[in-house]
């Protein structure tokens, strides 16, 4: 599975203004709902918050991977947002979070869900990949960085 | 060589032995002991610092500069004081701690609970080390370490792979593993490798195996090629170590006799081991040993509370014709002498503890892979919730990252070693084996708090 196959490039946000965890998720949900008719922003926000309540998806090193399942969706959808200032996302290492990679999947997606999560998690473990996202000046730069990782694995 | 700083609580045999070895190599060592008489012994015999005081009090730890040490070792005579000292040492800044406890019960059921609560990087039990060594001798195993998980339902055994072992001769995919056990990793010079089916161990590597005690015993039998029947085994002494050894031998021999001098104790053992023959008698009485057929014993193990009794009993057993003798000798200074006099295995609990701590230090703290803090890989136990991404997933789909293994599922009070087709259900608890690099992925797929 390639991450580029599921990334909604029109929903990518390079300068996310939100400063609170909830607002980050709300802004990303709205951006995704605008380009994906199957997604309703408020319902997606609920799903993401339910999952965050279990444990933050902030996996450290400035990265969070919010995710959840949605009834009525027929395929996996992802989006990316960046906040250069960093947001307190209750990350496991206690550090501010800069990179947000959102994944939403159909209710019955089986192994695809876990494969996608594990794959994204692996991308972000690479410090060089994170640096490329920090330095990206355009959505095209982000796409290029992801395409390069997709080609590696 | 870098000079390291070690602080050792307890100037008993283990503490002094370690302090001597480490200071001779040029490291800075401080011993802590509350007994003023120990100060003189230490100052006369060793070139190390000494702090008089109770190691489970913060002022003593601060006076010993525990906050600046590379390793804090708690090996005093009190299990409780050692555990508390570990926690306090971490609070005042120690980077790593080792805790020695006497009894094995701290480890066999609640090991990870004690390790986490008292923040010990390595928790070891002299009794467990002793039992393990004796069982290795008797069964031909190469066990180095045993850790217990899920309240004792599962164990992780670290065992050395020898040339000729099936774990070396075959690819892992071709090894006929018993049900309910799993090879988690190979350790090669302290480096952990999670194997694929195509990998095999090299001689001298260690294998980390998880499973039920019975399944791992079965695997060790297949690996060692030893026969099932050990012949007659006679144990002199019926204390707690003998009890643990007898338990470990269950299923390996049908003929086991225990000679115990205390009648009440003998009756207790008889009630607990109905298949074994428990004899009330004196293990240093030659005619009594002869009458019990010790001359025909394949294995004679002397585990009474007295070194002299153990050695005497072994000499008599040897004279009668027993094949292999093992003696428990608590005073480690004399154990080498005894080894010279008679052809016997001498097991010294204190030497075993000192050796184990030494190998932990020498491997740059990697030899204890399963520890809670600072480890390169660890076990965590998580619950599967409705909103966990892994809920309802097939294991074959989850094991994408190589450093993340669902080692066991705890369901309805039973531990299951899963296969790829097993599905995770909401309400299951899972035991995960997680490489440090995959800790984030583990938290993504299995969100929630660590469970015991």
Image (tube, rainbow, N blue to C red):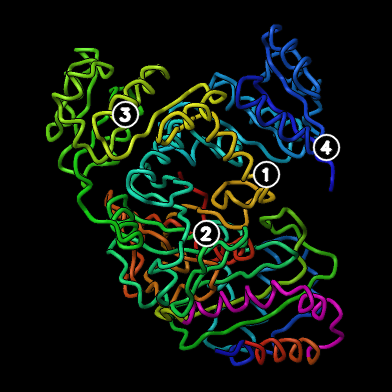
Q: Quadrant of residue A28?
A: bottom right
**Badge 3 local density, few (<14 within 10 Å), some, or many (20+)?**
many
- On whether disc 4 and disc 1 are found on a single subunit, the reply is yes
Q: Earlier in the sequence, mark 2 or mark 3?
A: 3
Provide residue A68's location: percent of width, then percent of height.
Answer: 52, 71
Any magenta on residue A134?
Answer: yes
Instruction: Read off the chain for label 4.
Output: B
**Quarter occupied by residue B223:** bottom left
Which residue was labeled with disc 4?
B26
**Segment colored magenta:** A112-139
Q: In x, y percent, where is residue B361?
A: 67, 44
Respond whether the residues carrying marks 2 and 4 are from the same subunit: yes
Answer yes or no: are tags 2 and 1 on the same subunit.
yes
| Marks 2 and 4, how far apart at CA | 46 Å
* Residue A102, placed above or below residue A146: above
Q: Which of the pair B410/B78 is nearer the observer? A: B78
Identify the main secondary structure in magenta: helix
Instruction: Give the distance between the C-alpha atoms of the residues marked 3 and 4, in whole angstroms.
Output: 40 Å
* For marks 4 and 1 on the same chain, the one whose residue lies earlier in the sequence: 4
């Amino acid at each position: 599975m390639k991450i580029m196959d599921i990334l909604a490039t029109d929903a990518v946000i390079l300068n996310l203004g939100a400063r609170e965890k909830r607002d980050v998720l709300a802004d990303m949900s709205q951006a995704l709902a605008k380009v994906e008719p199957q997604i309703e922003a408020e319902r997606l926000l609920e799903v993401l918050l339910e999952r965050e309540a279990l444990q933050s998806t902030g996996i450290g090193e400035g990265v969070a991977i919010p995710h959840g399942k949605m009834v009525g969706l027929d395929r996996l959808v992802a989006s990316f947002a960046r906040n250069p200032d960093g947001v307190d996302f209750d990350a496991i290492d206690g550090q501010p979070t800069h990179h947000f990679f959102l994944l939403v999947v159909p209710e019955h997606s089986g192994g695809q869900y876990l494969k996608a999560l594990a794959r994204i998690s692996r991308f972000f473990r690479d410090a060089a990949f994170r640096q490329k996202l920090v330095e990206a000046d355009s959505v095209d730069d982000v796409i290029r960085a992801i395409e390069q990782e997709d080609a590696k694995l | 060589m870098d000079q390291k700083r070690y602080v050792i609580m307890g100037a008993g045999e283990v503490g002094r032995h370690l302090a001597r070895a480490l200071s001779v190599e040029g490291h800075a060592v401080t011993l802590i002991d509350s007994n003023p008489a120990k100060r003189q012994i230490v100052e006369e015999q060793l070139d190390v610092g000494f702090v008089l005081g109770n190691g489970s009090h913060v002022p003593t730890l601060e006076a010993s500069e525990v906050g600046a040490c590379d390793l804090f070792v708690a090996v005093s005579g009190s299990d409780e004081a050692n555990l508390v000292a570990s926690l306090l040492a971490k609070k005042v800044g120690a980077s790593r701690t080792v805790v020695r406890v006497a009894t094995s019960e701290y480890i066999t059921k609640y090991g990870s609970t004690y390790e986490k609560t008292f923040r010990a990087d390595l928790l070891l039990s002299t009794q467990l080390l002793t039992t393990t060594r004796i069982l290795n001798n008797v069964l031909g195993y190469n066990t180095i370490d045993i850790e217990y998980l899920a309240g004792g339902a599962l164990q992780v055994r670290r065992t050395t792979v020898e040339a000729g072992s099936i774990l070396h001769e075959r690819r892992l995919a071709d090894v006929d593993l018993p049900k309910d056990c799993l090879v988690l990793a190979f350790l090669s010079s302290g480096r952990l490798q999670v194997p694929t089916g195509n990998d095999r161990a090299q001689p001298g590597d260690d294998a980390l195996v998880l499973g039920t005690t019975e399944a791992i015993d079965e695997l060790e039998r297949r690996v060692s090629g030893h026969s099932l029947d050990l012949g007659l085994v006679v144990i002199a002494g019926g204390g707690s170590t003998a009890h643990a050894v007898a338990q470990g031998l269950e299923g390996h021999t049908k003929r086991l006799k225990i000679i115990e001098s205390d009648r009440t104790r003998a009756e207790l053992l008889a009630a607990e081991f109905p298949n074994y023959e428990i004899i009330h008698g004196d293990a240093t009485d030659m005619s009594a040993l002869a009458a019990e057929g010790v001359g025909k014993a394949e294995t004679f193990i002397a585990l009474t509370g007295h070194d002299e009794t153990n050695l005497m009993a072994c000499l008599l057993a040897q004279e009668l014709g027993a094949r292999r003798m093992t003696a428990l000798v608590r005073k480690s200074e004399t154990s080498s002498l005894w080894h010279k006099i008679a052809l016997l295995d001498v097991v010294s609990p204190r030497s075993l503890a000192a050796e184990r701590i030494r190998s932990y230090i020498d491997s740059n703290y990697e030899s204890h892979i399963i520890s809670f803090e600072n480890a390169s890989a660890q076990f965590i136990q998580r619950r599967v919730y409705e909103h966990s991404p892994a809920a309802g997933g097939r294991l074959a789909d989850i094991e994408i990252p190589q450093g993340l293994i669902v080692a066991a599922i705890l369901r309805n009070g039973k531990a299951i070693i899963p296969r790829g087709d097993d599905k995770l259900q909401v309400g299951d608890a899972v035991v995960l084996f997680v490489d440090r690099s995959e800790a984030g992925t583990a938290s993504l797929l299995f969100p929630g708090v660590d469970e015991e």
